[in-house]
Image (cartoon, helix red, strand yellow):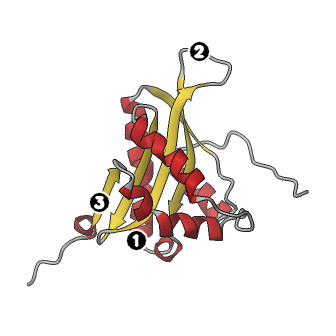
Amino acid sequence: MANHPSLSDKMTIRLANNEQDFALLRPVSLELHAESRFADIPYSFAKRDKLFRQAIDSPQTHALIIVEYKQQPIGFLFCAIGEYMVGTDVLLTTVYSFYVRQHYRSNAIGGRTAIRLLSAAIKWSQARNSNEIMIHVTSGINIQRTDHFLRKARFNAIGANYALKL
């Protein structure tokens, strides 16, 4: 019987470590934007790169976590750690982007990607003594599915997001 590489052997997870990673994430970022409720807003790679650059310039406070499958990016998570805006001495992690490519979401690869991204964010946060991770779900993509996934991962709903289109 031939040995076949496992799913894990074909999947890698890592922190972005140079600007070439920004180019690597271009198609994933565009897919996220196009699928989100913000798709009608013009997209700026310059603004995205400025945000992502924080993960390179300030790795103690910002992380850009990338999952690759067969050497292609299929998901990423961008987060930052800091104090509550009017508090002191307690660090909180805020996840700003958490995305798995649509093509992979309905199979084991997508599930494993989401779990690995979340686990990596938790480990990154724990290593920096964060007391809590907050994930803001505002993309409008599979809200119920995202809620189910996060609750299963032991996250608690602490509020909701509301919008009024003007």
Looking at the image, which residue sits at the far front?
46
- For the residue labelled by badge 1, is the local secondary structure a helix, a strand or a loop? helix
Residue in the foreground of this view, choosing between 47 and 116: 47
Q: Number of callouts in the render?
A: 3
Of the residues tagged 1 and 3, which is closer to the observer? 3
Name the residue located 74 percent from the left edge and 46 percent from the top edge. 160
Check residue 12 in the rendering and tell me which mark sits there, or answer none. Answer: 3
- For the residue labelled by badge 3, is the local secondary structure a helix, a strand or a loop? strand
Where does residue 57 sit, x and y in percent of width and height? 41, 37
Give the Cα distance between marks 1 and 3: 15 Å
Circle nearer the N terminus (2, 3):
3
Note whether 11 is above or below 56 in the view shown. Answer: below
Determine which residue is flagged by label 2: 88
Report the amino acid beneath label 2.
Thr
Report the amino acid beneath label 3.
Thr
Circle nearer the N terminus (1, 3):
3
Give the Cα distance between marks 1 and 2: 41 Å
